[in-house]
Amino acid sequence: MSNRVFGTDGVRGRVGQSPMTVDFALRLASAAAQVLAPEGGRVLIGKDTRVSGYLFESALEAGFVAAGVDVMLIGPLPTPGIAYMTQRLGCAFGVVISASHNPYQDNGIKFFDASGSKLLDEVEARIEALLEGPVITRDSQRLGKATRSDRSRVQYQEFCASTIPSGMSLEGFKIVVDCANGAAYKVAPRLLADLGADIVPIGCSPNGRNINDGCGSTSPELLQLTVAGVRAHVGIALDGDGDRVVMVDEFGRCVDGDQLMFVLASERHRQGSLRGPVVGTVMSNLGLEHALGELDIEFRRAPVGDRYVLAMLNEVGGILGGETSGHILCLDKTTTGDGLVSALQVLAIMKQRGVGLAELAAGMRKYPQTLLNVKVARRFDPTAAPEVMAAAAEVERRFDGRGRIVLRASGTEPVVRVMVEGDDAELVKRGAREIAAVVESVAARQ
């Protein structure tokens, strides 16, 4: 992307450092209001549980109100909940204050348009073009107002419940739900309990600093131990802002986003409701592509980032796509990646079929894969570095056509991701380490 501030998922960074400062948030609100609601209107602001959410919420509120936009403050709610409620409440746009799966020291700001979709690149560019301008303040009679909208949490919960067959109960299921001490800590346990499940909550006691800390979809080890320890039927792990999900089967084994996509795609295919190709990313496991191929389901790969998965789904007329991390798009149910909705689709299949998650996921064999994140002082394109590409070519030669390599700079963190995948686990690990060492050496000279 050519934009200087917006990354693959809004603006994100370390709190107190550019761009995540109070001054920037105020200017961003002013610029966004001019582009997204030039004649006034209403904006919905939600957030996750980071302590820094308070200061960014206040800064954004001030900027929007000054620009003549009415503000609705909803507090902690999953990112997809903000997308849904933005559309339901008739807002001109929505804003989420969250750094998703990052640690609490980071935060971010992302936008949804009136339809609950993420902004197009050209819209973000128009906002960026106004960031250096003055913060506007309308005449007193045209200033916006701010209100709170706590009832919206229940409306989002009701929407999630509506995405499974009418009247379906989860009674008889014992479910461990890990909310990463994040935005879903209220709605997820309440939703599952209301549907009749026996709930064991973990990661549901946020203190502003423990979001994603040893819990949630990026650290499912505690969930795996708990599922086995309490003899639960299944475990659900969301990330800090609730748009990602990984699950744990009845044996305590992690089921990632690729495997969940296989479960959802194969069942929709069996029922005749799957439309278009399934879309993953360049990082999706080769086993997913092969397992879908055995069912005659077409599979496409998009660049990393759910916005690119969504763009390809729209291009090819698909309804199901996502990422290994658990960011899954079920466009027949909602407009954006939603961890709770995705988990409910899997639970509904388990209920309808009368089988456990382990059996549902067994049709996909995961190829050995190693992903290493190499920290860099500043981002660079690893595919443009001759030394890195030479190392990758040598590793690829050893696979003799039975593996693949993906190199990419993260769009949200100062790291270069080195992914090696193939049918030889030892070769995969060794090759990833060799390439990562070269990336680290090149990065040190940048």
Image (cartoon, rainbow, N blue to C red):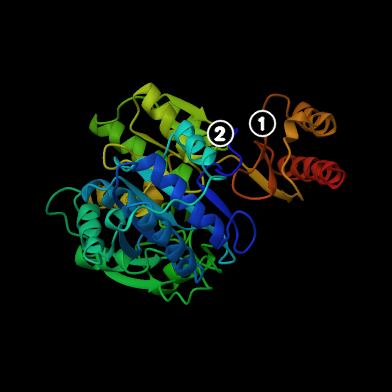
Give the side of residue 421 with respect to residue 27, left or right: right
Give the side of residue 371 with respect to residue 309, left or right: right
**Quadrant where the image shows the N terminus:** top right
| Rendered location of residue 21, percent (x, y) | 58, 60
Q: Residue furthest left?
A: 167
Judged from the image, the secondary structure of the residue bearing numbered disc 1 is strand
Judged from the image, the secondary structure of the residue bearing numbered disc 2 is helix
User: Taking 381 as reference, is 200 above or below it?
Assistant: below
Hey, which quadrant is residue 196 in on the image? bottom left
Query: Can residue 237 be seen in this snapshot?
Result: no
Gap in angstroms between the C-alphas marked 1 and 2: 9 Å
Name the residue beneath numbered marker 2. 286
The numbered mark at residue 404 is: 1
| Rendered location of residue 436, percent (x, y) | 78, 44
User: Taking 120 as reference, is 253 above or below it?
Assistant: below
Q: In percent of the image, x 87 and y 44: which residue is there?
A: 445
Q: In percent of the image, x 85 and y 32: which residue is there?
A: 387
**Circles 1, 2 touching at the beta carbon (< 8 Å):** yes
Q: Residues within 10 Å of mark 1 (few under 14, many from 20)?
A: many
Q: Viewer-proximal residue, 198 or 252?
A: 198
Q: In percent of the image, x 40 and y 43: which residue is there?
A: 34
The amino acid marked with disc number 2 is Leu
Q: Viewer-proximal residue, 43 or 41?
A: 41
